[in-house]
Image (cartoon, rainbow, N blue to C red):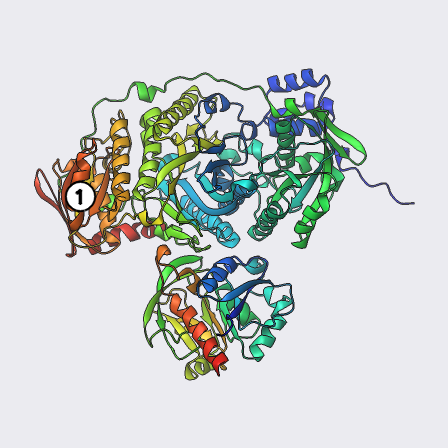
Amino acid sequence: MMNKIRAAVISFPGSNCDDDMLYALQDFDIDADIVDARQASLSGYNAILLPGGFSYGDYLRTGAIARFSPIMSAVAQAANEGKLIVGICNGFQILTEAGLLPGQLLMNERPGFICEEVAITVANHQTSFSSDYAQQETVILPIAHGEGNYYADPETLERLEQHGQVVFRYAQNVNGSLNNIAGIMNEKGNVFGMMPHPERAVDALTGNTDGRQFFKSIVNSILSTVAK
Amino acid sequence: MPKKPLNPMANEATPEQVRDHKIYEQWGLTEKEYALIVKTIGRLPNYTETGIFSGMWSEHVSYKKSKPALRKFWSQNDRVLQGPGEGAGILDIGDNQAVVFKAESHNHPSFVEPYEGAATGVGGILRDIFSMGAQPIAILDSLRFGELENSRTKHIVDGVIAGIAGYGNAIGIPTVGGEISFDDVYAGNPLVNVMAVGLMDQAAMQVGQAKGVGNSIIYVGAKTGRDGINGATFASAEFSSEAASDRSAVQVGDPFLEKLVMDATLRVIREHADKVVGIQDMGAAGLVSSSSEMAAKAGMGIDLNLDLVPQREANMTPYELMLSESQERMLLVVTKGQEKAVMDIFQDMDLDAVIIGQVTDDGRYRLRFMDEVVADVDVEFLTNPPKQDLPQTKPQRLLSAHQEQFVPDVVDATATLKQLLAQPTIASKAELFRHFDSQVRADTVVKPGGDAAVVRIRGTKKALAMTTDVNARYLYLNPRIGAKMAVAEAARNIVATGALPIGITDGLNFGSPDNPDVYYELHESVEGITEIAKQLNTPIISGNVSLYNETDGTAIYPTPMIGMVGLIEDNRYITTSFFKKPGDVIYLIGDTQDSFNGSEIQKLQTQQISGQLFEFDEQAEIANQGFVLDAIHAGLIESAHDLSEGGLAVSLVESAIKNNLGIDATFAGSTSQLFAETAGRFIVSVAASNVKTFEALVQNHDVSVSEIGEVTATDLINIGTDQGQVIALPVATAKDIYLHSISEMMKD
């Protein structure tokens, strides 16, 4: 029997979905730790998750200060090693600020924070983050952000589309994102970011379990890599 | 030769000038109070001393005028671990856990500066919760604005909503519920009441006390600046339109900093509870109130060196340092010699943590600044201004109210229903509360838009239901009965989710207590709340008073917001307000009368509220609540929804539209009564397979229950009365009106 999957949830000052992510990972029998962003090492983890929140208050620009945290060079190194890196909401914003994912998250087209459950379409289910969903399946996931409006220059956007890097799209465009983009991955397919919150959709009691396949996809991906 | 540093106090008025120029009056102290201070301390108080008395003796801090009413609150039963008097009240919920909650108002600052006023309201109430040792788990709000007619009001609405969102979302505590309504009387005095709920292990309980001679007073959190100076005094006076802007008295919030302070404080309590003697947040009247109240509660004295207070601005005077209401600051009392472990935790988060003084045994409140003693007064005297029991008179409008009930003019009931669904008080507020993160922490089971919010307690089967409520129009017509109805409605909301109501916090918003009519309303309201709270076994464990909500002599309606918490022992009982499936049978619980004075339909059709408030059958209310709770616990209820503004017809629509279901209902009453607001009523839906068991259960209760129809798969809301089929409204139309009226009105 193989050892448990190990995952790190990075806690930046101002992160506020770190515990939610920890609980969700534990629910999938993953051995997860909260790791302080002021640490510099991330060895021994199969997956690294950057949770939602308001890192450093998001005062300059979302994710703009967090990208300079000591932990971020370890995150970049893990990305190079092919580990799975996942950024949710503010984590997605930090990954784009750090240049680990292309594009940028701008202020919502209609300014203001929005918290809602929205329909999300699976644009590519052949990824480490979506394999447990069906292609073009529509699921409901919670969003909660004021700066989720995905922008990239035309060439980048074209490249994302051509290489199947767009993983999730909003069924109805809620924030002005180009091409309705809700979640993307890098070309290598191991770094991923999305604005919706799958960790808030894992428990029938709280009314939504559509996020479970997201975590199952990650687990399956890690198990199949380890098996190889 | 080095220059001697300038003493910032050099230009302050002398004690004689304070007396001669009546500076104390500008700060809200009366001639009589000033004379008492002079007599008691045996000399003229200096500038700093006069300032700290003005803050401590303001109504906002001392409750000197409201205390005679507040003393009547009932606040004891076997669940109460902490009643009024601390940062927040605490109730036992079993398994060594406790729920902590309190409400606070930020009315005056929110009018002047809506965003910061509301944001710092959230910050302040959260500090009250975590200073008790509890992890905040939810925020609710209760908001009152003028009618959505002018851009000034819309600006206030936008600012307040953005402020609550800006602070609550960033700190990561979900805003799970609340209520918003609109009436002209709030145009110049909007109400921003925020309630926070926390969860704790009973062993972690903290109080704000300064015990033990020589123990250290530690200042933690943000540095002190010149914001909000003497804000408590500002909150204890009326507005006039000439002097509407007083921005320097409004504080500025930083939720990021507060999150660090919150996490560090809770960690200190987890890891070093044995070293911490007391914790208190610096709220109204900042450093002076937190430190002197902690000393007073322990019967001790305090000696502070103000040179050590972390400062954001240069040349601050003792007066400014003591009365600044800069946010995100806490005061801790820590056992002498044990300070380092505690301070290390704050400093690890890059927060200031500084020993600024000690607990003494001489009962004196002593402040030092630049090697001088700048204040030296008795703690007891400083914290106990003379209470004022003011004259009360029954307002003329109550004496001369017409006795007969308003008779609505309902020619086309479908049209009337559509009009009511578009009323800002009734229409969905989703357009506003969608800006609040209601799901962070991933524990929110029933989200905003239901009768009450429900938050699970992770790792247990338990959940907590919570709500805020008050219909101030009822209180305007009868403060005592209206207050009872506010408590009853809050309890109905809680019961409809399957929870047992267990306690109350209040936010008493009134006009000037110096007006005998208002003082009468305050007393009547408190008595009404207490009377029904005893019957419901829901003690009032905390609360807040906001008086002087008047502009140019016009007072708001008496608006005692009721915040209530309920306990759900097993989360499978959690019930929502919307219909689930076609074929379920709809029942109306409770009798319906011609209850129209104070109703939404009276307001709609006459543009005002008048007459004697309709009758309130307290015993029926309590019996109906008991029955609904029993039926939910017996597993017989698919949905439960309380009836309130707009009556039966509106509640039926609210239950139907969420799942796009139709209704076929016949009500055995008049068409007008579809819109009556008789209290104590619910609609519930029951699966066809449970109908027999449900009807058998009715037999065991002394309640009036009538089957009124069923949920249908059609897209039509069909309602009949004694007068035949009177309402036929497509579900889609009803939903569109209900969901989009507020955003239409918010457009310029």
Q: Chain of mark 1?
A: B
* Mark 1 burial class by Cα count in 10 Å: few <14, some 14-19, many 20+: few
Give the image location of residue B687, x and y in percent: 18, 50
- Residue B29 visible in the current orientation: yes
Residue at 60 percent across and 23 percent down: it is: B384
Q: Is residue B565 left or right of residue B649?
A: right
Residue most toward the right? B1
Q: Nearer the viewer, residue B95 or B423?
A: B95
Residue at 38 percent across and 41 percent down: it is: B567
- Residue B313 visible in the current orientation: no
- The residue identified by callout 1 is B693
Q: How many marks?
A: 1
Task: Tell me the SS state at disc 1.
Answer: helix
Residue most toward the left? B724
Give the image location of residue B485, x and y in percent: 32, 31
Q: Nearer the viewer, residue B85 or B623?
A: B623
Image quadrant holding the N terminus of chain B, namely: top right
Give the image location of residue B677, x and y in percent: 24, 35
Give the image location of residue B74, x and y in percent: 43, 26
Q: Is residue B100 above or below residue B22?
A: below
In the rendered structure, which amino acid carries the disc numbered 1?
Thr
Q: Is residue B262 above or below residue B321?
A: below
The quarter of the picture where residue B669 lies is: top left
Q: Is residue B582 left or right of residue B559?
A: left
Q: Is residue B142 left or right of residue B273?
A: left
Residue at 23 percent across and 33 percent down: it is: B678
